[in-house]
Image: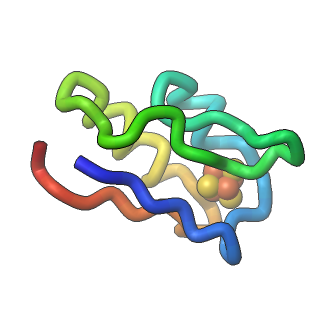
Amino acid sequence: MEIVVDSDRCTGHGRCYTLAPDVYEPDDDGYCQEQVAPVPLELKDRALLGAANCPEDAITVTGDD
Ligand code: SF4
């Protein structure tokens, strides 16, 4: 499972890394960056939670494993 964060869409709300800090983390300016790549299966739900709560729809999660 892979995560792609569209840096052109991310505005730094921080919902992703607040809800799922084990998958997403802020960079020095508060924009999202992936914490783990690829995402292990045990963090799948956290990755999807962060993506679903991004108000800018900036996170794409691909793959089933
Ligand atoms: S929730 Fe979306 S807009 Fe906010 S930091 Fe995460 S990726 Fe960026």
Which quadrant of the frame does ligand 1 lie within? Answer: bottom right
- Identify the residue at horizontal 58%, vertical 42% (top origin): 16
The single residue placed furthest to the left in the displayed view is 64
The single residue placed furthest to the right in the displayed view is 29
In this picture, residue 52 sits left or right of residue 39:
right
In this picture, residue 14 sits left or right of residue 48:
right
Choose between 39 and 52: the one closer to the eye.
39
In this picture, residue 55 sits left or right of residue 35:
right
Q: Is residue 12 above or below residue 41?
A: below
State the image coordinates of residue 50 (x, y, percent, origin top left): 48, 43
State the image coordinates of residue 7 (x, y, percent, origin top left): 66, 68
Choose between 4 and 58: the one closer to the eye.
4
The single residue placed furthest to the front in the displayed view is 37
- Identify the residue at horizontal 26%, vertical 36% (top origin): 44
Classify residue 42 by image quadrant. Answer: top left
Choose between 14 and 2: the one closer to the eye.
2
State the image coordinates of residue 18 (x, y, percent, origin top left): 65, 30
State the image coordinates of residue 9 (x, y, percent, origin top left): 67, 73
- Identify the residue at horizontal 40%, vertical 63% (top origin): 60
- Identify the residue at horizontal 30%, vertical 28% (top origin): 43
Choose between 52 and 37: the one closer to the eye.
37
Q: Is residue 39 above or below residue 51?
A: above
Give the colour scheme shown.
Answer: rainbow
